[in-house]
Image (tube, grey):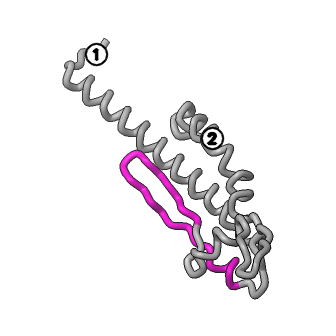
Amino acid sequence: MANISIDQLADEITKAVREYTEDVSRAIERKVDNVAKEVLMDTAMNAPHDTGEYARTFKITKQDEYGKTRRIIWNKKHYRRVHLLEFGHAKVKGGRVPAFPHLRPAYDKYGVQLPDDIARIIRNGGGE
């Protein structure tokens, strides 16, 4: 049986916890990136395609902070138009323009499962 000091034991435990945390963080970031790409592709596919420019200008923006991995899917050029198309809007001379939901359905399709996937990644120590 080997004799090790308390300091060596503490160092090894710290090293193991750090490796676990890094593995889990990388796996979660990969999963969030994959889900964001799926949402982006589904949104672009289901967006109104009069000229195709609106659907092509959706982008993913990373907003990572310590302990948080966040991806924002937005329309870089027509960001004001997304809300109007997603929910519909009133016409100037009365009546309403119908809604063309495309962003929320994509999120509901792919993003709802994400918390369960993250919990599984944490349980598996970074393995998917």
Q: Position of residue 57 (x, y in %)?
A: 62, 79
Q: Position of residue 45 (x, y in %)?
A: 76, 71
According to the image, label 1 marks what residue?
A: 2
Residue 66, compared with residue 79, is above or below; it is above
Q: Which residues are magenta?
A: 53-73
Q: Can see residue 21?
A: yes
Rate crowding at label 2 as few (under 14), some (14 to 19) or many (20 or more) other CA atoms within 10 Å.
some
Mark carried by residue 34 = none
* Amino acid at circle 2: Asp
Q: For the N terminus, give its image quadrant.
A: top left
Q: Position of residue 58 (x, y in %)?
A: 62, 73
Residue at 75% over, 87% down: 51
* Amino acid at circle 1: Ala
Residue 50, compared with residue 127, is above or below; it is below
CA distance separating discs 2 and 1: 40 Å
- Outermost residue to the front: 93
Q: Can see residue 128?
A: no
According to the image, label 2 marks what residue?
A: 117
Most foreground residue, 12 or 111? 111
- Outermost residue to the bottom: 51
Mark 2: which secondary structure? Answer: helix
Q: Position of residue 42 (x, y in %)?
A: 73, 64
Rate crowding at label 1 as few (under 14), some (14 to 19) or many (20 or more) other CA atoms within 10 Å.
few
Is residue 36 shown left or right of residue 52?
Answer: left
Most foreground residue, 63 or 98? 98
Is residue 64 shown left or right of residue 28?
Answer: left
Most foreground residue, 40 or 90? 90
Point out the frontmost of discs 2 and 1.
2
Q: Quadrant of residue 80?
A: bottom right
Q: Quadrant of residue 67?
A: top left
